[in-house]
Image (cartoon, rainbow, N blue to C red):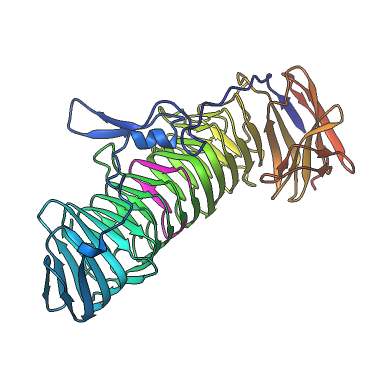
Amino acid sequence: MKLTKARAAVTAALLAATLAGCGVAGAVTGASVDDSSTTTTATATPGASVEAVLAANQESHAEADDGTYDASSAVTVTLSGSSATASGDGVSVKDSTVTITAPGTYVLTGTLAGQVVVDSSVEGKVQLVLDDAHVTSSTGPAVSVTAADEVVVVLADGSTNTLEDGSGYGDGEGEPNAALYSAADLTIAGTGSLTVTGNSNDGIGSQDGLVILSGTVTVTAVDDAVRGKDYVRVEGGILTATAGGDALKSDNAEEGDRGYVVVLGGTVKLTAGDDGIQAATDAAIGGGTTTITAEGDGIHGDVSATVGGGTTTVTKSSEGLEGKVVTVSGGSIDITSSDDAVNATDGSSSGGGMGGGGNSSQDGVSVTISGGTLVVDAEGDGLDSNGSMSITGGTIVVSGPTASGNGALDTNGGLTITGGTLLAAGSSGMAEAPSTDSEQGWVSATFDSGYAEGTVVQVVQDGKVIASFTASKTFSSVVFSSSAITSGETYEIWVDGTPSGTAVGGLTLGGSTDGGSKLGTVTADVHTGGQGGPGH
């Protein structure tokens, strides 16, 4: 067994939260323009809060829209089989197509085997109130907004609504390609329910911004479930999205203040054949309850991935939380991944895989953790940065890989700790510890023989158990850091003791050594070696 200890800690004060009590004030993400060309690129600042990320991006079109409408001035459109009738102006009906041609409020009720089209060249908002409306198209979108200033789909109180499109359409550039399609900014509000089935491509899609404020929305699509080219914002309601491709997606990579996806509230359940959340720029979660099961990445932002609030569970993913700049400033996050759980990379091939910074550090790439609770279970690296990594607060528990080709901690630019609590367990072949210039102390232990799932490993000082970790899988290295580790003092590593207290990812900050055995001791800043006991 080898035991090492770094220098003492002076815990850094956490910066004030700005969103849901868990953002970090500071510089923001935003757009920068290369003077030598017309290309606009998005940039991100390490440690930026969710609020800061939003402030640097395009403002939502639906900031003041709650989906209310004046029923007395609304036009009622009664859907009936392959035709429809309207109680007022602004509506034309031809064969099985209902076309809305002017701003206003239109209440749709009944069943239509056809299509609803919004084609309004007049400035002003179009409100489509779905009040037990069921539209099925065999040739294209069920609802297609081809021209409008802005469209709001309101789900009437107590209503149940369905939209389903045909298949085999929308493959051309710029063509309508979703069961609920909009060429304009689109908002979904109200307290009713909406079920959308996308048989050709996407379920709900907007060529501009897309906001879900409320309602119960269920989307199933062969490709992306919910896509807004400029942005997707989920602010409330219950959203269940099942996608053959990405579940929530924004793909405007040409404009640096767009292409973002943010979840600020509501209950969101995402199942994806590719990524759960995919953003061309920034992916952020600031509130609500989000559950993701993805064959690809759980949360992916090409520029940044930020979690600052809410409860997020990634039950399955390749890489759980990934971006060039990754920030965790609050909330509760639980990630299970078949590769890296948290990964910061610029996408180049110069970065990954070498524990302890074996490859060159990528400029502008970072992981910053300043608050919240982060629990990860990774088959690849637990926390991985192809650049730098900084921990200033929060509680982080890493159940890392069992194979030696990866590590519970893996950075190319080094890990510094100035606050928070970190427990990282995993294989020892690529094991990495924090930098020795970290302000907060840490203890690192590697074992010649692995210890099995269920083993309790403890950090003890003068008979007091500082930390107890119950392993969820085999491990042969452990790193622990907290404000309880003091420079110059001696610590012991024990196994098979008894934990006590509230557990977070198997970690408790207490317990007893009853029934356990001591493996060795270490003094701050002194590296000692020894042989571990037999594998358990």
Front residue of this view, candidates 157 and 41: 157
Residue 272 magenta-drawn? yes
Q: Residue at x 68, y 33 (%)?
A: 479
Locate residue 526 relative to residue 172 in the image: left or right: right
Residue 77 magenta-drawn? no
Front residue of this view, candidates 361 and 472: 472
Percent position of residue 294, x then y: 47, 56
Q: Residue at x 44, y 29 (%)?
A: 46
Which quadrant: the N terminus? top right
Q: Residue furthest top?
A: 488
- Examine the image and state in which quarter residue 90 appears: bottom left
Tally the marks. 0
Q: Residue at x 74, y 19 (%)?
A: 526
Q: Main secondary structure of the magenta part?
A: strand
- Examine the image and state in which quarter residue 94 appears: bottom left
Percent position of residue 230, x then y: 27, 46
Evaluate whether residue 22 shows in this view.
yes
Q: Residue furthest front?
A: 72
Percent position of residue 186, x then y: 26, 54
Report the magenta residues as a range: 268-287
Locate residue 422 relative to residue 156 in the image: left or right: right
The relative height of residue 20 versus residue 435 in the rendered view (above or below) is below
Q: Residue furthest bottom?
A: 81
Percent position of residue 195, x then y: 37, 68
